[in-house]
Image (spheres, helix red, strand yellow):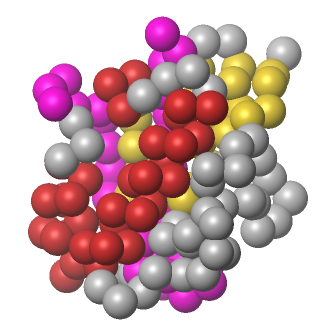
Amino acid sequence: MKTVVNTTDAPPPIGPYSQAIIAGNLIFVSGQIALHPFTNELVTDNITSATHLVMENIGAILTAAGADFDDIVKTTIFLKNMADFAEVNEVYGTYFTDKFPARETVQAAALPKGVSVEISVIAAKP
């Protein structure tokens, strides 16, 4: 059994997928990009502001699912350019206090809408 999670506080899906799915006690959040949830405009001025918006979008979806960043157990970060890793990592780290989730970071040849960063997460429902 699965439950679809949707919130207007995060960007609507740009394809045939849900913002998140709850299956059992796990929450699978689809990859989020730096798309502003209210204006539907991309934030592309720099990787730091883009990463903050990606994390804020993830936070809004987690809230709608009844969870928060402390509940994340696994993240996947996709970067257009691995040279952005240090800046993305610095922003990413500010969203966690301790017991960091497992993570992988990969460079992708291309990402949706030509963005520089996309992040997906799996969380355990509290």
Q: Which residue is drawn at 61% across and 54% down?
A: 10
Determine the image quadrant of residue 79. Answer: bottom left
Q: Which residue is drawn at 36% across and 32% down?
A: 69
* 22 lies left or right of 122: right
Residue 113 is situated, as x and y percent measured from the top left of the image, at 62, 84
Q: Position of residue 75 (x, y in %)?
A: 40, 43
- Left or right relative to 113: residue 49: left
- Up-down relation of residue 69 to residue 37 (above or below): above
Image quadrant in which you'd find residue 107: bottom left
Residue at 75% x, 60% y is 13
User: Which x, y percent locates residue 125?
Assistant: 53, 15
Please, is residue 78 above or below residue 80 in the view?
Answer: above
Task: Work out whether residue 34 or residue 29 is closer to the camera in this orientation and state it.
Answer: 34
The answer to whether residue 70 is above or below residue 19 is above
Q: Residue at x 74, y 59 (%)?
A: 12
Q: Is residue 120 magenta?
A: yes
Q: Quadrant of the N terminus?
A: top right
**In the foreground, 57 or 84:** 57
Asked if residue 95 lies left or right of residue 31, the reply is left
Residue 77, horizontal then vertical, whole percent: 39, 58
Query: Dividing the picture into quarters, in which one does residue 103 lie?
Result: top left
Query: Residue 55 vs residue 16: left or right?
Result: left
Give the tally of numbered discs. 0
Residue 60 at least partly seen: yes
Q: Is residue 78 shown to the viewer in this render? A: no
Residue 75 within the segment the image draws in magenta? no
Residue situated furthest front in the rendering: 38
- Which residues are the magenta region? 97-126
